[in-house]
Amino acid sequence: MNRNLAGEDAKASTGETAPSHFIRNIVAEDLSQGKNEGRVHTRFPPEPNGYLHIGHAKSICLNFGLAAEFGGVCNLRFDDTNPSKEDVEYVESIREDVRWLGFDWGSREYYASDYFEQLYEFALQLIKIGKAYVCDLNADEIREYRGTLTEPGRNSPFRDRSTVENLDLFQRMRAGEFADGARTLRAKIDMASPNINMRDPVMYRVLHAVHHRTGDRWCIYPTYDFAHGQSDSIESITHSICTLEFEDHRPLYDWFLDQLGIHHPQQVEFARLNLTYTVLSKRKLLQLVQQSYVTGWDDPRMPTIAGIRRRGYTPEAIRNFCDRIGVAKRNSTVDIAMLEHSLREDLNKRAPRVMAVLRPVKVVIDNYPEQQVEELEAVNNPEDASMGRRRVPFSRVLYIEQDDFREEPPKGFFRLSPGREVRLRYAYIIKCVGVVKDPQNGEITELRCTYDPETKSGSSQSNRKVKATIHWVSAAHALPAEVRLYDHLFTKEDPEEVPHDTDWLANINPKSLERLTACRVEPLLANAKPGERYQFERLGYFCVDSEDSSPNALVFNRAVTLRDTWAKVEKERRG
Ligand code: ATP
Ligand code: MG
């Protein structure tokens, strides 16, 4: 696998200006030459047979981005030519996702199915000029006649039907006289062409299926290859941007447009996005959903737009990521750490900080008055003073993270341990004076501490130094919450890399989800709305789950971690 971190051809991106790339250069050059009467008109053409994923985001940013940059427009076109796999649920999710990413197609929402009548007319036109014929070979026979990369194909025995007979049969195909797969309409090009796509490709097939838009009006459907280029032409697209696997189809699309004598968009191919630890194929993502490896298309572990939105990603982070990876002509794989970095960078600027304890251990401050509650002042975002301050209740009984205490601290561990001091964020310095354990199982149930009243944060004597500051919540005031921690969905950088007798599903990470149900969060989060994002201090960025969270039962997804220097030290030490 050809892997590169920065994204091939990507200029070092500051996130401020989009880097230049070869497609932008082509569009700029065409404009300077006065091509297309100075128009730039692109489209994003998804097939509504699944949810959009981060790879589609690259294509969306590219198509809508170029149109915006050059004063053009971009269509949203549903390439809905295959009724057996398509569904309105997908249409709706695609609309929502493109809009959420921040792009507007205005009134330019189109469907290939709206062109079925026009495409049928185009097919009749090709039959009339002797460039298309009805073929009675079945799918297996067509494949057999097609030949291979090294062997030319053979002409179909039906290739030389008369125009009159072809017109009659094609009209009867449409009228529903034939069974599924019984006949096809094929382009008459060249069975010996070195490009297999040119060996009399199928243009229409018989399929008695109900379409999500045209119902049962049609029982013949155009193939993607016959519909795609003509749809672009009908919409007066200037630049048909698509992924590299369509490079070999370009001569076919050109052939159709030339034979029909209609507007000729320029097709430009670019490398699709691949990400480490991720599959980006709708077929595979559908399999993950159908076989319940995930909870749905919007499972926060999925690379779908719906999944990463629920996870806590922002449109800004995704758009910056797409700028950063650039646009290249050669396939490569981007490190998923780059996507995570884009989110961290965005949320660092915007997410309010709060305190939350994921794996709580109780702390009792022996010398703090029983009934006393102090409202301590905390900073909402050290990166942005305009986000202001808030008050956090402090009292005698607190929770801290189990991880922040060690009964026998290893070398280099500077947080709480017996006899040691730490600072509680925004509060006081405390010292551990005792450890209470469950007599049954020996587990720590409580830490007894004392606090130094002279060390309140912000007070004149607060500058006494201790080696670590940890977060906490007040036991009486904190809210219970569930927190879901996510890891990569696959254990291998390349999920396709598997031993002989298994497939990619063998690389699914059994530990991709960890649910912590005894967490405690700052009381302020009582008002947290679904989809809101926070930094839990020292732990990462978290998002209120849009499906499962409610005011009485808060659920947070960890969108991305902060860099954890301690974990790194420990890892290096383990070797
Ligand atoms: P998949 O391979 O995931 O099933 P697809 O290409 O069949 O995807 P379409 O709905 O046809 O899905 O895709 C719509 C547009 O998005 C196409 O122009 C396609 O080239 C582009 N696209 C799809 N996957 C990627 C990707 N990984 N990177 C960049 N663009 C992509
Ligand atoms: Mg496709």
Image (tube, rainbow, N blue to C red):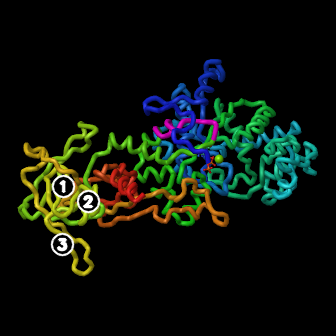
Q: Quadrant of the C terminus?
A: bottom left
Q: Report which residue position mark 2 lands on.
A: 404
Name the residue at 24% across, 36% down.
386
Front-lying residue, 150 or 80? 150
395 left or right, relative to 212: left
Mark number displayed over residue 265: none
**Residue 202 x, y percent position in the rendering:** 80, 48
> Does dot 2 land on a helix, a strand or a loop?
helix
Q: How many marks?
A: 3
Reply yes or no: does residue 464 show up in magenta: no
**Residue 413 x, y percent position in the rendering:** 27, 57
**Residue 255 x, y percent position in the rendering:** 79, 35
Residue 504: image quadrant is: bottom right
Q: Report which residue position mark 3 lands on.
A: 436
From the viewer's perspective, is residue 455 above or below residue 349? below
Residue 132 seen from this side: yes
Q: Is there CB contact under 8 Å for labels 1 and 3?
A: no
Residue type pointed to by label 3: Val
Residues rendered magenta in the picture: 320-330
365 left or right, relative to 258: left
Residue density around tag 3, few if under 14, some if 14–19, many if 20 or more, within 10 Å: few
> Does dot 1 land on a helix, a strand or a loop?
strand
Front-lying residue, 550 or 218? 550
Q: Earlier in the sequence, mark 3 or mark 2?
A: 2
Mark number displayed over residue 422: 1
From the viewer's perspective, is residue 140 above or below residue 444? above
Residue 526 seen from this side: no
Residue density around tag 1, few if under 14, some if 14–19, many if 20 or more, within 10 Å: many
Q: Earlier in the sequence, mark 1 or mark 3?
A: 1
Reply yes or no: does residue 324 show up in magenta: yes
